[in-house]
Image (spheres, coloured by chain):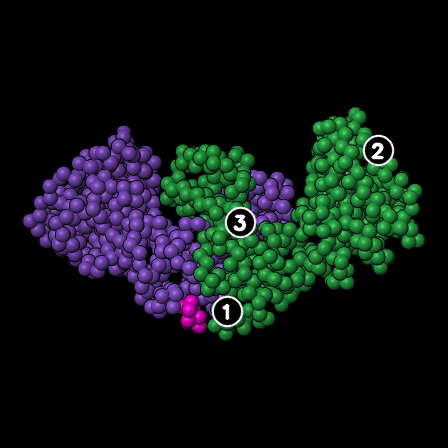
Chain colours: A green, B purple
Amino acid sequence: MKVAKFGGTSLANAEQIKKVCGIIQADRSRRLIVVSAPGKRYKDDTKVTDLLIAYAERFLEAGEAEAEKQAIYERYQEIVEELGLSEEVWKQVQSELEGVLVNKQGLSTERFIDAVKAAGEDTCAKVVAHYLSSLGEEAAYIQPKEAGMLVTDEASNAHVLPVAYEKLAALRERKGISVFPGFFGYSTAGDLVTFSRGGSDITGSILAAAVKADVYENFTDVDSVYVVNPNLIPEPKEVKEITYREMRELSYSGFGVFHEEALIPAYQADIPVCIKNTNNPSAPGTLIMAERPYATNRVSGIASDSGFCSIYVSKYLMNKEIGFGRKLLQILEEEGLSYEHTPSGIDNISVILRERDMTAEMEQRIVARIQTELEAEDIAIQHGLALVMIVGEGMRRSVGTTARATTALAVAKINLEMINQGSSEVSMMFGVKAEEADRAVIALYHEFFGEEESETQAIQAGSSMMA
Amino acid sequence: MKVAKFGGTSLANAEQIKKVCGIIQADRSRRLIVVSAPGKRYKDDTKVTDLLIAYAERFLEAGEAEAEKQAIYERYQEIVEELGLSEEVWKQVQSELEGVLVNKQGLSTERFIDAVKAAGEDTCAKVVAHYLSSLGEEAAYIQPKEAGMLVTDEASNAHVLPVAYEKLAALRERKGISVFPGFFGYSTAGDLVTFSRGGSDITGSILAAAVKADVYENFTDVDSVYVVNPNLIPEPKEVKEITYREMRELSYSGFGVFHEEALIPAYQADIPVCIKNTNNPSAPGTLIMAERPYATNRVSGIASDSGFCSIYVSKYLMNKEIGFGRKLLQILEEEGLSYEHTPSGIDNISVILRERDMTAEMEQRIVARIQTELEAEDIAIQHGLALVMIVGEGMRRSVGTTARATTALAVAKINLEMINQGSSEVSMMFGVKAEEADRAVIALYHEFFGEEESETQAIQAGSSMMA
């Protein structure tokens, strides 16, 4: 059994929905389908979810939002008509949608917004179920409340409750095709609550775990994940197979295929995730799994992100002082800051964190506390850093990856502000000046993906490493 | 004004003491002299300090230790005679020494041991002062109690009290040559207390800071500090100038010139330290200072040490968990463990620590706590690691040091378990398997000190980097 989730662009109009249903019909094991709300049909189009948010805001402000409501109806009506569904289907769908949109009574503002937003996915699931039925399939819309999608009561930020998995497991036994709306669940008190953005991915991941799917297929609009951000390298190589750990290490920008928290349920249940393209379903896509077979090219991808800063602290004989590092991290924790890495020397330590998290006042307070509480000798804050990650499970099996990477960066005249490679060897992190990050990524891409030669050849040849 | 400290081998016999006094006379600014106790005259000889310890132990056990006492007297008597000093000098010196050795009354065991140990340096200082006087110099033995060497009351582990610096500053105004015994001071209650091992270096460093010396000369039996452990590379290059920070980063084995805590007073007072050879005083030695001029060869030294282990911890979405790293370090702190480095990936962190600090029971407790308190997914302990450090202040000014280092290691087929380079860029740390550490150091030595070529040439030439 496969769980297949389709994103907004895969459901943007009737033509796309026909593709989706063709994909469902092409593989009888695709029995549990999760849908997003219809997305953009063209570049400047508006997603249905954004139409719904605009509606809710206007309705809360003005007590009515007729124009906004009509824009939503038009999107769905066009889809229903072009799918060749009957006027009755449209009336039924519209009536249920209307029931949500104008029914503010008894709902707090937060609950009303969550209910309106969720109507995008919910309506879409009904339309898809109707269309599949019209094609002669045994297909049914599944109501998340009835199915047991139980979540915490945090508006727009729900988290699944463990009990939900037990209830949702029953979906495995359902006959035919089940169409499940993504993005929301119900609190134990029975109120509708949505997940955070990207919530349909979460729904799919939860269902895949609950029914113990063979694979969780995530259909989007790209053929695969690429080894590097396509904005930097035109037509980069595709990632065929990648592990969860690699995917996480690559979570810096350029790898935003879907929200990483969405992966957790599938990860924990050890369900492989396959990223596929609705517009090119025969492409193999990218498979995310727990372990991947040893590949000749042991680097899986290169990612980078800017907007980091470092706090450098030094003190003579620091490393003989038990608790120094812990106290430093505690100061950051008390400011509510998380950090990325802490490269260190004997008597110095640098903490790398996101610049956006640290205000100027926090920075002042932190420096003052490090000075007075830790009696540090030198404290220096460096802004404008980027982190460049090379990721690959296979790196641990071979000598010389670091040499190839650092030589490629040296030839590109990029100075390394920091290097960090833990004993997992899934990744290697280089800190560079933000303005040099793109050049660094391009240099590394050419080193590891530019030519088809083995590392041993490269090292033995010597000069070829300089390419 | 210079403070010159002479180590045990520089004072092992009359011949060596003559060299020492020649060195003192050769530079009139060497006005404050610190002496150790006489050291080994040949490989299997016993240091006077060890004779004194043997004496004290036997005396405490048996109530007398005549043979051990005679061994001590013989060493000093031979020195006094061979220096051509009079019988009266010997009688006086012996009588004062005897006063310490047999005077246990009213002293605790700890105090007695400290007093006996200190007699080695104290007697030596008197002999040197007598000999300098016999040469016509205005020279005097300085009693540390009278001079104000005030320390904390921790037997065998005294620390200087801040007030001592004010009192000892008066030594700057003394005429002639002052000979000060190293290794001990007095508590404010007036009791003799010794420093930890290497304590004469501490005495010299304190005096240099107190009198604001132009330089603190530390005479030993090597021409200089070497860029690498001479046991690994025969006749390695000498270090001419090195900064305190570099010296500290190199404090792993192979750079044990003197105890690093001994440097603190000089470091804090910004007094340059010069390591010189009593047996070759015209050699320039190694100068340790706050800043060093930019040198063409920006790597100052290569050190390594084994006996490390790593605790690898991974958990999906770890880096979104504020406080994870801090809690991990807190567990180690609660076990009384200090750590060396914490290289990390997105969802994993490794803590590098000394194996000797962690017992098997501690290891079990720590793993259990990480599992239950941090809910980590994977915990792996790797034993038998070595850390290899490349150190050099100049590294930050140039591109490509890392590339040269990692390429040299890759060519030597050494796998890198870890890499760590903080934003100070004074050092670069590589974790390797212990059995590969020596080969790693040798490969790095040949890369950075083997041939006289600039880094730019090396990178441009390409193949030459592989040498």
Q: Which residue is mark 1?
A: A467
Q: Residue B271 occupies which quadrant of the picture? A: top left
Residue nearer the viewer, A176 or B176: A176
Left or right: B279 with respect to A184?
Answer: left
Q: How many angstroms separate mark 3 from mark 1 (CA)?
A: 26 Å
Q: Residue drawn 33% across and 68% down? A: B452
Quarter containing the N terminus of chain B: top left
Are dots 3 and 1 on a single chain? yes
Q: How many angstroms separate mark 2 from mark 3 (CA)?
A: 46 Å
Q: Residues within 10 Å of mark 3 (few under 14, many from 20)?
A: many
Q: Position of residue A36 (x, y in %)?
A: 76, 46
Residue type at numbered disc 3: Ser
Q: Position of residue A210 (x, y in %)?
A: 79, 46
- Marker disc for residue B182: none
Residue nearer the viewer, A115 or B391: A115
Q: Is residue B253 visible?
A: no
Q: Which residue is mark 3?
A: A306
Q: Is residue B462 magenta?
A: yes
Residue type at numbered disc 1: Ala
Looking at the magenta stretch, what is its main secondary structure? helix
Q: Residues within 10 Å of mark 1 (few under 14, many from 20)?
A: some
Pick whichever of labels 2 and 3 is earlier in the sequence.
2
Q: Which residue is mark 2?
A: A99
Quarter containing the C terminus of chain B: bottom left
**Magenta residues (range):** B458-467
Pick whichever of labels 1 and 2 is earlier in the sequence.
2
- Which dot, 1 or 2, sits closer to the camera? 2
Are dots 2 and 3 on a single chain? yes
Q: Residue drawn 90% across and 48% down? A: A85
